[in-house]
Image (spheres, rainbow, N blue to C red):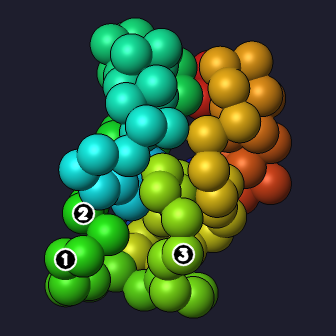
C-alpha cells in the first residue's frame, strides 16, 4: 500500500508542470488617433476585465510604434490598429486584425481562446 501511495505521489509531481496554467494575455496593438481603437475602448474596454475572457486573457496594450516587449514573439509585423493578439507563454497563438464590432469581436475572441485550448469559464 505504501509503494502505491509513493508511486501516486511521484506521478502527480511528475505531471504537475503539464497541468500548470499557461500565461495568457490579450495584447492590443493601438495608436493615438485610431478611430477603431476609440470605438473598442468605448464598447469593450470597460467590461473586458470583468468577463470570463478578460479573466482568462488579461489585456495588455502596446503602441504600434513601440518596440516589442521583451519575452514576446509575434508571428508578423503589425499593419493595422487595433490588432488583438492572443499570447500564450509569450508566443502568438492567434490574432484579430481590426475591430469587427462588438458582436463579432466576442465570437472571434471565443474562437481564438477555444483553438488555443483555453476555457474562459473554468
Residue placed most toward the observer, 4 or 103: 103
Q: Is 55 in front, or is 29?
A: 29
Front residue of this view, candidates 79 and 8 = 79
User: How many residues crowd around disc 1 within 10 Å: few (fewer than 14), some, or many (20 or more)?
Assistant: few
Give me the disc on residue 79: 3
Label 2 environment density (alpha carbons within 10 Å; few <14, some 14–19, many ≥20): some
Q: Is residue 94 visible?
A: yes
Q: Earlier in the sequence, mark 3 or mark 1?
A: 1
Name the mark nearer the viewer: 3 or 1: 3
As helix, strand or loop, the secondary structure at mark 1 comes to: loop
Which quadrant would residue 53 be assigned to in this image?
A: top right
Give the Cα distance between marks 3 and 1.
Answer: 13 Å
Residue at image mark 2: 63
The CA span between labels 2 and 1 is: 5 Å
Q: Quadrant of the C terminus?
A: top right
Residue 10 visible somewhere in the drawing: no
User: Pointers 3 and 2 in contact (CB under 8 A)?
Assistant: no
Q: Are marks 2 and 1 in contact (CB under 8 Å)?
A: yes
| Place of residue 34 in the rendered image (x, y in percent of width and height, measured from the top left) | 38, 46
x%, y% of residue 83? 52, 57
Tell me the element at label 2.
strand
Q: Earlier in the sequence, mark 3 or mark 2?
A: 2
Amino acid at each position: 500500500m505504501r509503494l502505491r501511495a509513493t508511486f501516486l505521489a511521484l506521478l502527480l509531481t511528475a505531471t504537475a508542470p503539464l497541468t500548470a496554467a499557461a500565461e495568457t494575455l490579450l495584447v492590443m496593438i493601438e495608436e493615438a488617433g485610431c478611430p477603431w481603437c476609440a470605438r473598442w475602448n468605448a464598447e469593450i474596454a470597460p467590461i473586458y476585465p470583468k468577463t470570463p475572457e478578460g479573466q482568462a486573457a488579461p489585456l495588455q496594450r502596446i503602441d504600434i510604434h513601440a518596440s516589442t516587449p521583451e519575452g514576446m514573439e509575434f508571428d508578423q509585423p503589425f499593419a493595422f490598429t487595433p490588432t488583438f493578439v492572443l499570447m500564450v507563454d509569450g508566443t502568438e497563438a492567434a490574432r484579430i486584425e481590426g475591430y469587427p464590432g462588438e458582436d463579432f469581436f466576442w465570437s472571434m475572441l471565443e474562437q481564438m481562446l477555444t483553438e488555443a485550448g483555453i476555457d474562459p469559464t473554468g
